[in-house]
Image (tube, coloured by chain):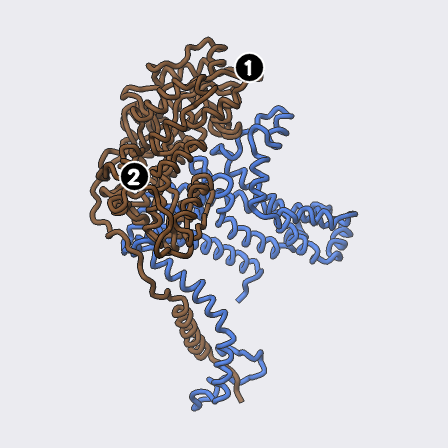
Amino acid sequence: MTRQLSRRDFIRVAALLSGAGVGGLLAACAPAPTPVPPTQAPAPAAPPPTPPPKIEPTPAAKPAAATGAQPTGEFVFTAHNKIETYDKWTDEFFATKYPTLKVRYDVTPGLSEYITKLQAQIAAGDAIDFMLNHESRAQSLGFRGMLRPLDDFRTAKPFYVPESELFTTPLPLLSWQGKVYAWPNTFASYGLYYNKTLFDKGKVSYPTDSWTWEDLGEAAQKLTSDTNGDGKPDVWGWVYWTDPGWMPGWYPTLRAYGTDHFDKDQTRSLINEPGGVACFQFMQDMWCKRKAVPPPAVLGQLGGDYAMFKQGIGAMSLIYSGAHADVMKASKDKFEWGIAHVPQGPAGRFMRVGGSSWSIPKTVRLPEVAWDLLRHLVSDVPTVASMAAAGHAVAHFPSYDKHTAPTGEIGQYVGESWKKVFAEGARKYGAAVNYSRIGVEYSPVVGAEMAFLADCSRTPKQVADTIAGKANTLLAEAK
Amino acid sequence: MALSFYGGRENASRLDRPGRRGHSRRERQELLWAGLFLLPNLLGVLVFSVGPLIFSLAMTTMDWQLVKPPSFVGAANLGRLVKDDVFWMALANTITYVLLYVPLLTLGSFVVAIVLDRKLRGITLYRTIFFMPSVVLFVSVAMLWQWLYEPQNGVINYVLGLVGIPGPPWLSSRLWALPSIIVMNVWRHAGYYSLIFLAGLQAIPDELHEAAQVDGASALQRLRYLTIPLIFPTTFFVVVTSLIAAFQLFGEAFVMTKGGPGYATTTLVYYIYRMGFEAFRMGYAALIAWVLFLLIFAVTLVQWRIARERGYGFQE
């Protein structure tokens, strides 16, 4: 009796069995037929981003308590930080309007990691109802077809307040082909904070409304000093650009020197135009010639720009509008401080505004609920007023002005300058960063290239040309 | 050639008996059972290795962003690759890492193994201590070394400062970031590979050393002419495995430096991740993965050839 098996026999049997096995496996893994959620039409050829149409004053309607048939199951809310889920107000909203729904907060720390995971989830068809978005990614996620446009929702169920009361400056940059893909949820703006005590010690005049970036550079150089005689500066004139790749950090400077990242139609990069090179030259001079700002590594190790300012070892920094109470507390009995306009440049004054936004992903299970939540968190006046009172820079101007402005002791200390810079100035000079439809890829490119500017190993022109070259390639590919 | 499932109990192959076609019922049953027992493994290989391999090869000719159907782009990804300076930097970084890490690790592990081969009091404890880094969770190791490398308050720069050397910002300097990762990884893996070397060293019979000693060979000569040649198979194993692992450097670049500063620690695998999961260029990422595969394959082939010429391992 023979029990030998030829190679051919073996392969035949193995192939047969494996084929059957794979077939069975595939059949088992095949998705069950499920109703496909309505999605936007596939994008035709790409015209430039256009400002979305304004949908004007709408009757304010307080969200009513739950009535009728209620959606059930889980409502998935994704974010990259817990704070911006506004969980207290979100939970209240669901408890009142959709008590049968259970909210699941899926928080992935780190913007980059969050967006990476989110894209994979959306691509895999995971049900995600609501997401915290960011200005740097919103347009490109919309362009890639990962988000649902908000326009139809906006028309069918308008905000509770007129849109003129809402922060809409970044809307064109959160839109693609005339469709809005994200709605601003914060009105973040950054003004110039300065340490009066250090200015007085250095005998340098305080910043004025006519200050240019060059004036800031000169002052910063004078204010940088080695107080303990170890040959290294321990007080810095300018503490900023902890991460030079963080584009909002130098966007006001870029615009002030007369250029932007891209042209209006997003057909080419403008970063290597004279204004862009001048901006990079200013920055590199601050690191390498004036040595008035710590190198990013040192800044990072010392806790970052904001921490250094609060410690009283940084004379100037650009700081967030809602930071006054924190700065007041930190400076108590240590130093005096003030707030001034962001410096201007040859092309004028620009103030970085923007921040996070809300979006509804393509794989939303409960789109109507998602929109209801969005407009509630953005425009339900008692809710946004409560958020503002809790220290959030809400995107509803009346609530922001009323609740974010410093009051009491801080109001007496910097109230007027805060109002001039953050209430009036932000609306007058506010500019949202133009990340474009290639933002997801463009941001890391800029991040990597700016390291060469900061360590002075490449000239501003070289860095600008490299960024522009890569950006133009990405733009050409992103049709 | 016949393939026997029964370990030589049978001598005659079916092919040796002309005129007989097909199998008996029993043979067919045995074939079926053999196949069934092999099925789980075969399925695993097909679904998780062969399938993705073929799929990824097809992907190299496609533009696929996952949310939209893939479109055939022919050699466009290849054209992009050739012009992509970040890819070339990633390739250069990967090769630099391999060229520095593998010799340092091999040498370091060997030296540690020689030290641990001594008959000392508490040697088991020392061996455990050296082995510990390789069982510690990688992220913990990365955090620990980030603190050690901290320019202002880190232990390394503090110690350097004591002898008057100003330490650089290790992880945020384009010059030092990659060497910093190399040093950390040598520390992390030396314990594991030294155990392999230790096993090799202990397999050398004491009589050989004694004979050489009687012949008047010094310790250095015994190391040069006895130990090193005799542990060549172990060295070969260490080099092959560490080299393949080195080509796949990712976690360190991801956790500690995010591929920076600039592109100083962007390696091929990190770039694959970025292209695939950040930029969602799956086709392009697949192409880079194939380049990496071919690179590792070529290097491994060369190693096999060297080993065969020396008469060690992988004999046919």
Residue that lies at the very extreme toward the bottom in this rendered image = B19
Labels 2 and 1 share a subunit:
yes
| Residue B5 can be seen in this image | yes
Q: Residue at x 37, y 15 (%)?
A: A215
Mark 1 surroundings: few (<14), some (14-19) or many (≥20) residues within 10 A: few
Chain A tint as drawn? brown
Q: Secondary structure at mark 1?
A: loop
Relative placement, left or right, of B37 versus A386 is right
Relative placement, left or right, of B201 versus A62 is right
Front residue of A420/B128: it is A420
Front residue of A122/A86: it is A86
The mark lying in front, picked from 2 and 1, is 2
Residue that lies at the very extreme toward the top in this rendered image = A203
- Which residue carries the number 1 mark? A227
Relative placement, left or right, of B72 versus B232 is left
Q: Is residue A199 above or below residue B81?
A: above
Q: Indicate the position of residue A207 as horizontal and vertical percent values.
A: 39, 14
Q: Secondary structure at mark 2?
A: loop
Instruction: Give the quadrant of the N terminus of chain A.
Output: bottom right
- Which residue carries the number 2 mark? A60
Q: Indicate the position of residue B113 as horizontal and vertical percent values.
A: 67, 49
Front residue of A301/A203: it is A203
Chain B tint as drawn? blue
